[in-house]
Structures are given as C-alpha cells and as structure tokens.
Image (cartoon, rainbow, N blue to C red):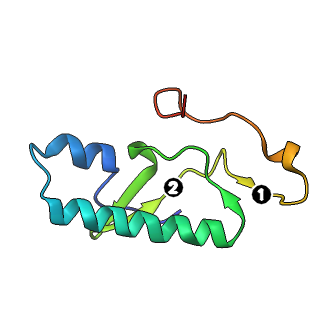
Amino acid sequence: MEYCNQGSLSKYISTMTLMPEEKIWDFILQISKGYQVLHDANLLHRDIKPDNILIHNKVFKLADFGLAKHINDHAIKENLSYAGSPLYIAP
C-alpha cells in the first residue's frame, strides 16, 4: 500500500473550518475518476466514506477494499448484498 502523507479525507475535513468550493470540486472530480476506474473493472467498493479516502500530495485516492466485490452481470442475485459502515450505508 502506498504511503499517503496527508492522511484521510476525514482528518482533512476536521482541520478545515470552511472548505473552498474549488477544493470541493477538485475532490469530487478526483474521486469520480477513481470510481470510474473501478466501474470499468467491474468492481464495487461498498465502503466509500471519508476515512477510506486518502490524500497524497493533494491527490485523493480510494482505499480499503476489504468489502469490495466483483460485479457479475450474469447473476443479479449474487450482486445483491448489504455491506458498509452503518453511518454511511444507504437506507
């Protein structure tokens, strides 16, 4: 695993009193591109939260693939499951 010298997004957010809109859009764009890579590889992360987004030299990186799952398009029932952190899981 690569060392991320700026810690997690959770830590980053806790140090900010107000995050500039430019930084928010940069974060959204980077994470969206990262998730696109997962989608193209038929992977589902299943635990996206601020603690699982790490920062290295202002580059946001998805981490902690412990709950990740390969998406099988042919077996819909196999793709249905509930996993993730309770505070961040969809209702």
x 53%, y 32%: residue: 85
In this orientation, which residue lies closer to the viewer: 27 or 65?
A: 27
Distance between the alpha carbons at the discs numbered 2 and 1: 18 Å
- The mark found on residue 6 in the picture is none
Residue type at mark 2 is Ala
Residue type at mark 1 is Ile
In this orientation, which residue lies closer to the viewer: 1 or 69?
A: 69
- Is residue 90 depicted above or below 53 in this figure? above
Q: Which of marks 1 and 2 precedes in the sequence?
A: 2
In this orientation, which residue lies closer to the viewer: 61 or 41?
A: 41
x 54%, y 34%: residue: 90
- Is residue 64 depicted above or below 74 in this figure? above
Q: Quadrant of residue 27?
A: bottom left
x 53%, y 64%: residue: 35
x 45%, y 65%: residue: 32
- Is residue 26 depicted above or below 12 in this figure? below
**Left or right, 35 with reference to 26:** right
- The mark found on residue 63 in the picture is 2
**Left or right, 82 with reference to 37:** right
Where residue 41 sits: x, y (%)?
A: 69, 71
Where residue 19 sits: x, y (%)?
A: 14, 52
Element under disc 2: loop
Q: Quadrant of residue 38?
A: bottom right
Neighbor class of circle 1 (other Cα within 10 Å; few <14, some 14-19, many 20+) is some
Where residue 70 sits: x, y (%)?
A: 76, 57
Where residue 33 sits: x, y (%)?
A: 47, 71
Element under disc 1: loop
**Left or right, 19 with reference to 68:** left
Write down the residue under mark 1. Answer: 71
